Structures are given as structure tokens and as C-alpha cells.
């Protein structure tokens, strides 16, 4: 008989049916994403702001601003590769997240200073900080649950909502302060947000006992099997992985126009007057997170019903459809550019429609892509394959900047049209070769039925 007065240790405390540590990680990630997306919302429009304006920026061209934005976002994701390696081989996930948070606090604080050197130094610290925190905090969420725990997926869904709450609030608050008063006040608010996240994580350590600790190579005897050659089935699956990485690069190469070309388009070409008040351009960066929060259940329910009817619902198909729908979002941006050519400005509703389609496309593609890759990756190369996944995401961000940077020469209308056409053709091509690709997976996604 259990004593009703027994007090559980903090690490075993349950809140709403989940480990208390989940909510420590939830708020840590919420504030980290607040800081990142707050800075992201201001990045390009700060760089192009005239040096002679009341709220001066660097006075760069659109091309140069998007170029730097592309390098920044690419390096943020590529830094996840060494960040994961440090956690696996030196510090463990828990300490690497702590280190990443400290670097982020330093970086965002430096960005609050109004000098060109501090901007570059601050960006460098943010890149290193995100690299340490981002890949490891997600793994720690999984470490809160025992193997086979049915609550694990719900836990990740709760964690995912934290990401998007931070992503929704950041452009509204940091963007408004940065655009209305001073860019560096906006960057400073992002620093305060990250400080809240770091304090939450520091004082929440008692709820994370035994989660994300350093294990060491000696405790992974499976590492000895890395020297073995791939089996024929594994080689086939690696071929599909390469196609998957290409799909990831294409998806983010189009989607990440949001923080670059589309952010500048909202600032420079869009009529943002609503009831006599000018809507800050950075606020449109909140639409993606808002639509994710409000539409995730509906999109997930659609795919469930679609699958229950016996229709095609493989991960490759969902990713392809996601690319297709996201690409169609640029058709609305083409209409916006046409309206701008005629009247010298375009309506806000085009941006709403574009971000709506982009988000639906993301909800079809992004949640399944990571899971799909873990199913295909050979066990002895799982960590390396995961590093390549983040590298592909980073390359997609760089591709986005390369495409967006040419818009100043080719024009927004041609650029948006080109993205729409390419994404449509590419997605349809994947659907056409879907059957041979699925054969090469050798049933990686097959569900084992209970007898």
C-alpha cells in the first residue's frame, strides 16, 4: 500500500499527465524561438533601412540584405551538426543545451548595441547558440518518456506548440518595437526573451534528472558495427534518402522566402494601411505560426481520413503534396506583384493567402519528413544521416536567398512565378515516380498489424 503522503522527487512529477520536465523544455524552447524569430523578423528590413531615416539601418540593397540573410540562416542549421556531435561525444544533450542558451543570451544582447561590428558578432554567437540548443532540446523531449510510451507523440505535439507560440509572438512584439521605435530595441527584447528561457532551463534542472546526460561511446556497442558495409536493402533506402534530401532543399528553398524576399516585399511594396493605421511589415512573419496553431489539427485529421479511405498517404506523397501546395502560395504573390506593377502597391490579402498556402504545405511536409528519414536511415549511420538532414535544411535556406537575391534584377513577378512553376513541376514529377521510390524503401513505412 502506497503512503498518500509520499512526496515524489521533482524529476518524477507529473503535470497534465506528462513529466514536469516537458514544460521546462516547452518554455525554454518557446523563449528561444521568440528570440530567434524576433531577430529574424527584423533582419532584412533593418539591413535595407536608410542610414538617413529616423530609425536608421545599414542602407543596404535588397540583394545584399538577402545574401547575408541566406548565409546566416544556412549557418544556423549547419551549426546543428557540430552541436549534435558535441552533445554525443563531449558534454551530453543537457549541458550542450545550457551552453547554447548562454551563447544565445550573449549573442542577442550584443545585437542590442547599435554598431555594425556588434551586429556581425551578435549573429555569430546566435548561430553557435542555436547550433548547440536546437538539435539537442528536441532529443531531450524524447528522453522524458520510456520506450513505447504512447504519450510521447502528444508530448512532442505540446513541445511543437511551444515553438509556434514563440514564433507567433516574436514578430508582433519585437517587430513592432523595432520598426516603430528602434531596431536595436527590438533586438534587445529578443535578448530579454532568451534570458527568460535560460532562467527557466537553469531552475528547471531538478525536473530533468537523468535526461540528456552524457553517455559516452563505451555505452554504445552498436558503434562497432559502423565498419560494416550496407546491405542491399540499406543501399536502396539510401538512394531514396538522397531524393528526400533534394525534396527538403527544394521545399525550404521556396518556403524561406518568408524572412527574405517576402519580408522586404511586405515592407516596400504592400499597402499596409488598416483603418488608418500602418501594420508593421514584420507582423506578417507571425502568420505562419498562427496558421500552424489553428490548422494543425485539421490538416492532420484530413490525412488520417484520407488514409482510412485506402488512398495514397506515404511520407513521400505527403512531402510532394506539401511542396505543391506551398508552391501555389507563390501564385498569390505573382498576383500581388502584378497589382504592384499597375498601381504602385499591392493589397495585404495576397500575403495572407500566400502564407496560408505555405503553412498548409508545411503541415503536409515538415512533420513527416524527419520521421521518414529516421525510418530509412541505416542504424549504424543514424547520427550522420540526421546531420545531413539539418545540412539539407540549411542548404535550402541558402537556396532561398540565392533565388530571392536575384529578384532585384529579374523582378518579383518573374521570381514568384518561377518558384510557383518549378515547385508544381517538381512535385508532380515525384508523384509520377512514387511507386518505384516506394519499392526502394522496402516497406520502411509498413505498419505491423497485431494478430
Image: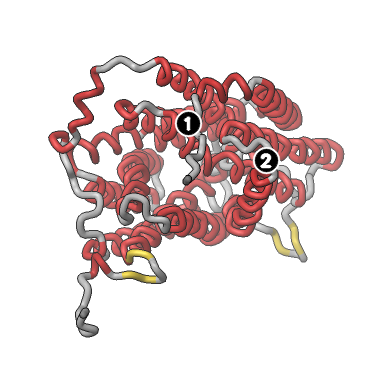
Q: Give whichever of 301, 61 is nearer the camera.
A: 301
Q: Identify the mark nearer the N-term, 1 or 2.
A: 2
**Numbered tag placed on residue 17 in the rendering:** none
* Residue found at the very far bottom of the displayed protein: 5
Taking 38 as reference, is 313 left or right?
Answer: right
Tag 1 residue? 444
Taking 412 as reference, is 55 left or right?
Answer: left
Where is residue 11? Give x, y as percent: 24, 65
Q: Give whichever of 27, 316 is nearer the camera.
A: 316
Q: Answer above or below: position of 99 versus 65.
A: below
Taking 447 as reference, is 301 left or right?
Answer: right
* Residue found at the very far front of the displayed protein: 451
Q: Give whichever of 189, 397 is nearer the camera.
A: 397
Tag 2 residue? 310
Crowding around mark 2 (Cα neighbors within 10 Å: few <14, some 14 to 19, many 20+) is: few
Where is residue 238? Give x, y as percent: 44, 21
> What residue is drawn where x is 61% and y is 30%?
404
> What residue is drawn where x is 73% and y is 26%?
421
Amino acid at each position: 500500500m502506497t503512503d498518500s503522503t509520499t512526496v515524489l522527487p521533482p524529476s518524477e512529477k507529473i503535470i497534465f499527465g506528462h513529466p514536469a520536465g516537458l514544460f521546462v523544455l516547452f518554455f525554454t524552447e518557446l523563449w528561444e524561438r521568440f528570440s530567434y524569430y524576433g531577430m529574424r523578423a527584423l533582419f532584412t528590413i533593418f539591413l535595407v533601412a536608410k542610414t538617413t531615416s529616423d530609425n536608421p539601418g545599414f542602407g543596404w540593397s535588397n540583394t545584399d540584405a538577402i545574401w547575408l540573410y541566406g548565409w546566416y540562416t544556412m549557418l544556423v542549421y549547419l551549426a546543428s551538426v557540430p552541436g549534435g556531435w558535441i552533445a554525443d561525444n563531449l558534454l551530453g544533450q543537457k549541458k550542450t543545451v545550457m551552453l547554447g542558451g548562454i551563447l544565445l543570451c550573449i549573442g542577442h544582447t550584443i545585437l542590442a548595441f547599435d554598431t555594425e561590428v556588434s551586429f556581425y558578432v551578435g549573429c555569430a554567437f546566435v548561430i553557435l547558440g542555436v547550433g548547440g540548443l536546437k538539435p539537442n532540446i528536441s532529443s531531450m523531449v524524447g528522453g522524458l518518456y520510456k520506450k513505447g510510451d504512447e504519450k510521447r507523440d502528444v508530448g512532442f505535439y505540446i513541445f511543437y506548440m511551444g515553438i509556434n507560440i514563440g514564433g507567433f509572438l516574436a514578430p508582433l512584439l519585437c517587430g513592432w518595437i523595432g520598426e516603430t521605435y528602434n531596431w536595436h530595441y527590438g533586438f534587445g527584447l529578443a535578448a530579454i526573451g532568451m534570458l527568460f528561457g535560460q532562467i527557466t532551463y537553469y531552475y528547471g534542472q531538478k525536473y530533468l534528472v537523468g535526461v540528456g546526460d552524457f553517455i559516452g561511446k563505451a555505452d554504445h556497442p552498436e558503434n562497432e558495427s559502423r565498419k560494416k558495409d550496407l546491405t542491399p536493402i540499406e543501399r536502396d533506402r539510401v538512394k531514396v534518402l538522397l531524393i528526400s534530401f533534394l525534396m527538403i532543399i527544394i521545399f525550404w528553398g521556396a518556403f524561406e522566402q518568408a524572412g527574405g524576399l517576402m519580408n522586404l516585399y511586405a515592407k516596400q511594396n504592400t499597402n499596409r494601411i488598416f483603418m488608418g493605421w500602418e501594420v508593421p511589415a514584420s507582423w506578417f512573419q507571425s502568420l505562419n505560426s498562427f496558421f500552424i496553431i489553428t490548422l494543425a489539427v485539421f490538416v492532420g485529421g484530413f490525412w488520417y481520413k484520407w488514409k482510412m479511405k485506402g488512398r495514397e498517404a506515404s511520407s513521400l506523397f505527403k512531402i510532394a503534396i506539401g511542396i505543391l501546395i506551398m508552391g501555389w502560395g507563390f501564385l498569390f504573390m505573382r498576383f500581388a506583384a502584378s497589382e504592384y506593377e499597375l498601381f504602385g502597391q499591392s493589397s495585404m490579402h495576397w500575403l495572407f493567402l500566400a502564407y496560408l498556402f505555405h503553412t498548409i504545405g508545411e503541415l503536409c511536409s515538415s512533420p513527416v519528413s524527419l520521421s521518414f528519414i529516421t525510418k530509412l536511415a541505416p542504424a549504424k549511420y543514424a547520427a550522420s544521416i540526421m546531420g545531413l538532414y539539418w545540412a539539407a535544411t540549411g542548404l535550402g535556406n541558402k537556396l532561398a536567398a540565392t533565388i530571392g537575391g536575384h529578384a532585384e534584377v529579374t523582378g518579383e513577378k518573374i521570381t514568384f512565378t518561377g518558384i510557383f512553376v518549378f515547385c508544381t513541376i517538381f512535385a508532380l514529377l515525384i508523384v509520377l515516380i512514387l511507386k518505384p521510390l516506394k519499392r526502394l524503401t522496402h516497406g520502411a513505412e509498413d505498419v505491423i498489424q497485431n494478430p
